[in-house]
Image (cartoon, grey):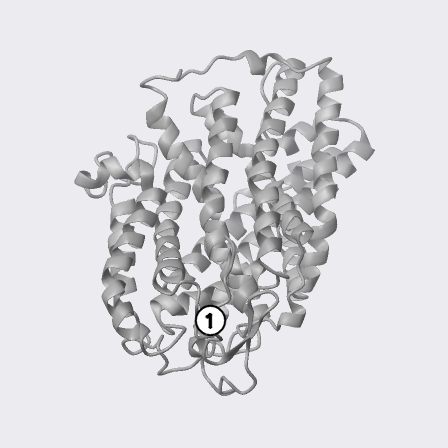
């Protein structure tokens, strides 16, 4: 992924030593309705995230309760632990590729995801993928906040006896709602202080969470006198005809777990010192951490089966089984840090920028974060995690299909059509080459629509297991549903290139940065 430095794009200057583009002074009218301070490119002097910062970001995001529970969901579907860990590891190697490709624009141009999307969708049309991504992030924010609140509730229940038996409000103990609201407020307070605060938080949160997970492993291993029988349990699916119908939708679901970040990773890489920092940081941080964390969850759960006679996949429920107050407090702090770490980075940063892009003069980064917090509560997302089928096949599969479609268009536009050269000022200026038809690139919209239909049109649920008809929404597309993310990405990428190449050839003579 070596970079050659192109001629300076219109409205930008090149840092020859690193191939980083900076917006020229006065290149963008300050009163443009497509500009605010949070959407403008990060100045080169402030792009200082290192390889460690990106690796720590991923370690902090990967070490969380839903990540821990991924292996349990796959085992519940019939896989053995080796198949589950293999599926998770392969998925994260695959999703790393679009992560690095879309992340390239961040260190080079200093722009967030919704501004990058303006190149392909148009200055106004970029709101379409931005709002799709924002909606997904708001749902994830609610899921993670609810899980974090439950973790605090359970652990405090062990410390304060009657905590979990309080009077119910809305079907839940009022003490659970208190935990949920406090956790929600702490998350928003951290992100409200800005991205530099997030960087510092992730730097120390990452090693702390690793230590917490290892402590849990040492504790359960010592209690069990060694790891238990779970590691010897055979797969209920085998490696034959029963395995593959579960493997492929599960693989797409595991990819979908981080497919959100494969779109908005420029929101973070825009602060990077250069391409080397984001490439090595992400490569060292994402696939290794997720695979090792899945392996760790299997080992700890195996020990729990040996000790308690049943597998306890939830780390919070397992930690709650100790009567040691210090151990409970340590587990409580670890759950807090782990969940805050992933939720802020993965699910608040992106919609904050996306909503700011919707109305730059009314919504800044902080207001976007507050809106995300409110929406994440209103959607009542705890329903999505009720069963493995609903969580992996329905929620993650549907999300992955739509977001894969957007990723295909971004990659095709930035790497194939524009060859990584953008007119930086044009991304903020009405009437520029990115204005298309009244601010919308209808070719990108068409590619998104076709890719989206192919990716999720065949969505189906087993009888009584989900919201879709058993024969699929569009029966003829049902065979594609198990490969939603890959189908959406490939179909949208190919169609966008076919539609845009003739236009690109005609326009490229107009100057660099098309």
Observer-nearest of 501 and 31: 501
In this picture, is 428 found above or below 61? below
Residue at x 76%, y 34% (from the top left corner) = 328
* Picture quadrant of residue 94: top left
Q: Is residue 59 above or below residue 375?
A: above
Residue 158 can be seen, yes or no:
yes
Q: Quadrant of residue 329?
A: top right
Q: Position of residue 87 (x, y in %)?
A: 46, 30
Quarter residue 398 falls in: top left
- Residue pictured at 67% horizontal, 63% vertical: 48
Front residue (pair 79, 447) = 447
Viewport quadrant of the C terminus: bottom left
**Residue 374 seen by the camera:** no
Look at 33% across and 76% down and name the residue there: 439
The residue wearing badge 1 is: 357
* Label 1 Cα crowd, 10 Å radius (few <14 / some 14-19 / many 20+): many
User: Would you say 51 lies left or right of 22 here?
Assistant: right
Indicate left or right for 287 with 33 as reference.
right
Q: Is residue 106 left or right of residue 166?
A: left
Please tell me which residue lies in front, 179 or 290.
290
Residue 81 in picture, x, y percent from top left: 52, 21
Percent of width and height locating residue 89: 51, 33
In x, y percent, where is residue 31?
Answer: 49, 88
Where disc 1 sits, the SS reads: helix
């Amino acid at each position: 992924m070596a970079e050659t430095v192109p001629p300076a794009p219109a409205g930008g200057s090149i840092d020859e030593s690193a191939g980083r583009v900076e917006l020229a002074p006065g290149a963008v009218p300050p009163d443009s309705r497509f500009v605010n301070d949070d959407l403008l490119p990060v100045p080169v002097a402030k792009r200082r995230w290192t390889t460690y910062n990106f690796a720590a970001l991923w370690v902090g995001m990967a070490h969380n309760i839903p990540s821990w529970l991924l292996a349990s969901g796959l085992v519940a579907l019939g896989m053995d632990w080796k198949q589950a860990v293999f599926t998770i590891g392969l998925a994260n190697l695959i999703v790393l590729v679009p992560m690095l490709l879309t992340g390239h624009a961040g260190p080079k141009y200093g722009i967030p995801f919704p501004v990058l999307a303006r190149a392909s969708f148009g200055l106004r049309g970029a709101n379409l993928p931005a709002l799709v991504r924002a909606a997904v992030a708001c749902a994830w924010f609610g899921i993670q906040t609810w899980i974090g609140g439950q973790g605090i509730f359970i652990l405090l229940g062990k410390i304060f006896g009657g905590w979990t038996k309080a009077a119910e409000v809305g079907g839940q103990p009022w003490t659970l709602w208190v935990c949920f609201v406090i956790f929600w407020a702490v998350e928003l307070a951290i992100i409200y202080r800005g991205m530099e605060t997030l960087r510092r938080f992730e730097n120390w949160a990452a090693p702390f969470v690793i230590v917490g997970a290892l402590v849990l492993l040492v504790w359960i291993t010592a209690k069990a006198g060694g790891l238990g029988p779970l590691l010897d349990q055979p797969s209920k699916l085998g490696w034959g005809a029963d395995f593959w119908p579960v493997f492929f939708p599960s693989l797409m679901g595991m990819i979908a777990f981080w497919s959100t970040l494969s779109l908005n990773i420029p929101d973070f890489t825009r602060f990077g010192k250069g391409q080397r920092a984001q490439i090595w940081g992400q490569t060292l941080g994402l696939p290794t951490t997720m695979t090792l964390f899945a392996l760790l969850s299997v080992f700890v759960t195996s020990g729990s089966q040996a000790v308690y006679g049943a597998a306890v996949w939830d780390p919070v429920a397992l930690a709650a089984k100790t009567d040691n107050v210090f151990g409970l407090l340590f587990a409580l702090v670890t759950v807090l840090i782990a969940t805050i770490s992933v939720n802020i980075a993965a699910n608040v940063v992106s919609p904050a920028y996306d909503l700011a892009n919707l109305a730059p003069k009314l919504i800044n980064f902080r207001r976007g974060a507050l809106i995300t917090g409110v929406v994440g509560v209103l959607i009542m997302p705890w329903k999505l995690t009720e069963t493995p089928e609903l969580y992996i096949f329905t929620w993650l599969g549907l999300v992955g299909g739509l977001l894969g479609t957007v990723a295909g268009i971004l990659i095709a536009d930035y790497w194939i059509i524009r060859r990584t050269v953008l007119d930086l000022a044009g991304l903020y200026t009405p009437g520029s080459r990115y204005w298309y038809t009244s601010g919308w690139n209808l070719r990108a919209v068409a590619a998104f629509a076709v890719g989206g239909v192919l990716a999720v049109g065949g969505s189906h649920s087993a009888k009584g297991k989900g919201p879709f008809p058993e024969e699929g929404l569009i029966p003829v597309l049902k065979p594609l549903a198990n490969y939603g993310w890959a189908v959406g990405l490939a179909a949208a990428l190919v169609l966008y290139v076919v539609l845009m190449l003739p236009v690109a050839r005609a326009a490229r003579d107009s100057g660099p940065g098309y």
